[in-house]
Amino acid sequence: MRNKFGIPVGPALPPSPSPWLTSVAAPPACRRAAALHAERGFALVITLSLLALLVLAVLSLSTLTKVNSQVAATATHQARARQNALLGLDVALGELQQHAGADDRITAMAGVTGLAALSSNTTRHWCGVWTDTGIFVKWLASGAVTATPAAIQGGLSHVVLVDTGTVGAPAANSEHVEVGKIAISFVDPFSGANTTAGVYAYWVGDEGVKLSAYSPLAERAGVALLLGSNPSTSATAKLRAALTTYATALPHVLSYEQLSLLPTPALTPSVLQDCFHHTTLTALRLVPQGLDVVRQSGMFNLNTNSAPAWRGLLETYNTTGAGPVLSAGSMGTSAVTSLPARIANNLAAAAESGKAVNSPFTSVAAFAGSALLANALAASGSGVTPAELMAGLAPMLTSRSDTFRIRAYGEAISPVDQTTVQAAAWCEAIVQRIPDPAPNGLGRRFVVIYFRWLGPDDV
């Protein structure tokens, strides 16, 4: 058959079915090809998905490895910093043992050298050691000068070891404490250069110049010392009220900081901060008794120019009638209010038999017979003589301490960049002198009775 143009043509084809019927009407070969194309497309999607999961897994493992490496490096830096802090603690304990281990040594708060109660006097609460003849021996603080008054050597970096976490904002009788940093150096075997690997620092605080919050009756030297209670809104008054209310819980307390656990609303953290420099948990003193040496609690080292501490001591006398000659309340309130400052503020400048200017009293007897005490009692209008006062207080007074607080600090420094501090650590220990002899003829032995690591917020 030909069309109108003369071109041969075949028979007319039937109309094409609808597209959605193509797969049904298509020959088997076409259907197999379409299915194959569909399977290949699904395989491509699966392959891409698995590839994405593989990339994600590799990325996760890489990130995990990096984080683990950083954690390990941080742990290493922190361990080095802690080791340096423990080095500072060991050095402090060694200095304390060497210079204050003997029975004839005198210890005192640095305030007795003329440092008044001012927020700027950051070395006022250093502990110093003197001989029994009043010759200065050493400040128990890192980087200290070898003379009085207490100061940090020039050229050293400073670190604050008693900061806002301990005493709040700096103020009179709540001063911060600074010491000098001591470098830990070594010679690089490759370059021959002197390299600093870290630093350490330490401060020894004299707990004996503070009032004891708790004095075990079996070891008590006299009556239990009281904190000042006037005005009633003061931090010492609030702490005194809490100690009275929860007296039965005090034998279970291990440190001064744990007093914050006493369940009373009045005892806020600021109360303990305000009382830190003149209150401790328990200060023990070694006292000869016949052929033995015994420990007594509630002793008070009079070599301090802390007026709040003196206030508590004199209020103890006035409240309890500690003297055998007097009854309770024999010293007027006005005298108790003014007398502590008269003693504390004039103690450094006093020149007595048994005390030089800007030096501590070398004995309780020297204080009892001093013009400082006689003049202060007379000026305050107390109506009490030195003999009467000492009859009640002498059993609780001493001119040296046997309980100390050590705070130590350590830094790990990058060996590549000496200005980069990789980690820092703080620790604290309460150290007690005991009757046992120390090796190498260093007097009586000191032992650590309490230890804790501190965080930056604790300092």
Image: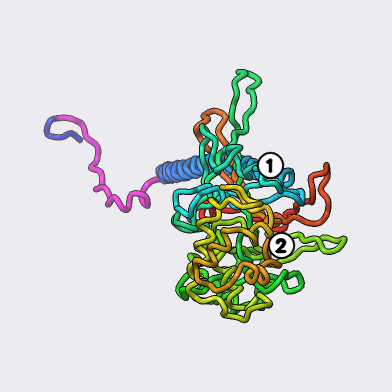
Q: Is residue 91 magenta?
A: no
- The residue sitting at 65% across, 52% down in the picture is 353
Q: Is residue 27 magenta?
A: yes
Q: Residue 19's spot in the image, x, y percent?
A: 29, 50
Residue for badge 2: 284
Tag 2's secondary structure? strand
Residue for badge 1: 91
Residue 248 lies, with reference to residue 444, above or below; the image says: below
Residue 181 lies, with reference to residue 344, above or below; the image says: above
Which region shows up in magenta?
Answer: 6-28
Q: Nearer the viewer, residue 176 or 270?
A: 176
Q: Amino acid at mark 2?
A: Leu
Q: Amino acid at mark 1?
A: Val
Earlier-in-chain disc, 1 versus 2 = 1
Quarter containing the N terminus: top left
Residue 273 lies, with reference to residue 38, above or below; the image says: below
Determine if residue 428 is in view. Answer: no
Which class describes the residues within 10 Å of circle 2: few (<14), some (14-19), or many (20+)? Answer: many
Tag 1's secondary structure? helix
Q: Quadrant of residue 404?
A: bottom right
Q: Are marks 1 and 2 in contact (CB under 8 Å)?
A: no
- The residue sitting at 55% across, 59% down in the picture is 277
Which secondary structure is most common in the magenta stretch? Answer: loop
Q: Is 155 positioned to the left or the right of 432 in the image?
A: left
Residue 237 lies, with reference to residue 73, above or below; the image says: below
- Residue lying farthest to the right in this orientation: 291
- Residue lying farthest to the top in this orientation: 191
Determine if residue 439 is in view. Answer: yes
Q: Nearer the viewer, residue 367 or 449?
A: 367
Q: Residue 371's spot in the image, x, y percent?
A: 58, 58
Q: Quadrant of residue 191?
A: top right
Q: Nearer the viewer, residue 350 or 358?
A: 350
